[in-house]
Image (cartoon, rainbow, N blue to C red):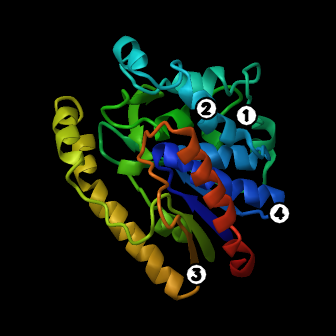
Amino acid sequence: MTGIVDVGGGLRGIYGAGVFDYCLENGIQFDYCIGVSAGSANIASYLGNQKGRNYQFYMEYTFRKQYMSLHNLLHKGSYINLDYVYGELSNMNGENPLNYVMVKRSGSIMKVVALNALTGETTYFDKSDMTQDDYHILKASCSIPVICKPYLVDGIPYYDGGIADPVPVEKAFTDGCDKVVVILTKPQDVVRPQKKDIPLAKLLRHKYVKAADNLLLRYKKYNEGVALAKEYAKQGRVLIIAPDNCCGMNTLTKDRKCIDNMYHKGYTDALALQEFL
């Protein structure tokens, strides 16, 4: 069984969208797909056989105030309006609907990573947790702590999968994969620091202690996950696809040229798949 991991990374996630568009164009299929945060949305469009769909989300919709803005933060409590992204735009009658029927029919296993904000435990949702026009598992996985309110699924608040299992390569092997492709959205030798997460964790601790604890450990989990992927790569069991630079992008950098450059970098770097697979 061949798997693929997309770690997401906010708007840097367009790098993964480029990789998946290359896959769709070249008929490359995976038996197992696991996505973190924005990576889960990339996987949904990939399994829906919708080449170019995610490109529109990053390049067009991102710049709408309904999508992400201080207006949302002030009036809705979340900088990113996840109900707009994975509801209004993505529903059957939306502007750019997800091909849910194709996702459901796909023979590939789909996993979506999120963090239970109350217990601090990692949740791996799958296709059975998603129904037509109810893409709450994608919203949960993309709910960035402090930037967004936690997203409720069956009354349980969830946060971004990036603070739960940021590089779920071990999960892919545990679930039965023989070979795994890991998409990173930062150069693979970049070591994630803890520094930026400390003030956010302090804010989060007022209401969600376990989530705050996990946020403080995100840097460690990410760095260990990448190190593990590199070890597997030496054994020929993992292919890491990662940009040589981030094209000037951080998680929420709204710059069309940078976003476009990251997309094309992902598409080009995906050439490495042919030999690995």
Spatial separation of the CA atoms under disc 1 and disc 2: 10 Å
Label 2 packing within 10 angstroms: few (<14), some (14-19), many (20+): many
One can see residue 112 in this view? no
Of label 1 and label 2, which has the lower sequence position? Answer: 1
Of label 4 and label 3, which has the lower sequence position? Answer: 4
Label 2 secondary element: loop
Amino acid type indicated by mark 3:
Arg
Spatial separation of the CA atoms under disc 3 and disc 1: 32 Å
Compare residues 171 and 65 and report the one nearer the observer: 65
To which quarter of the image does residue 102 belong? top right
Spatial separation of the CA atoms under disc 4 and disc 3: 22 Å
One can see residue 240 in this view? yes
Spatial separation of the CA atoms under disc 3 and disc 2: 32 Å
- Image quarter in which the C terminus is found: bottom right
Residue 135 is tagged as 2
Residue 156 is tagged as none
Label 4 secondary element: loop
Compare residues 208 and 183 and report the one nearer the observer: 183
Residue at mark 4: 26
Rendering coords of residue 230 (x, y %)? 45, 78
> In screen coordinates, is 237 left or right of 252?
right
What's the residue at 62%, 59% (across, down)?
A: 266
Rendering coords of residue 94 (x, y %)? 72, 21
> In screen coordinates, is 132 left or right of 265?
right
Which-is-in-front pick, marks 4 and 1?
A: 4
Is residue 88 shown above or below 114? above
Of label 3 and label 2, which has the lower sequence position? Answer: 2
Q: Are the residues at dot 1 and dot 2 in contact (C-beta closer than 8 Å)?
A: yes
Residue at mark 1: 98
Residue 237 is tagged as 3
What's the residue at 55%, 30% (across, down)?
A: 62
Amino acid type indicated by mark 4:
Asn
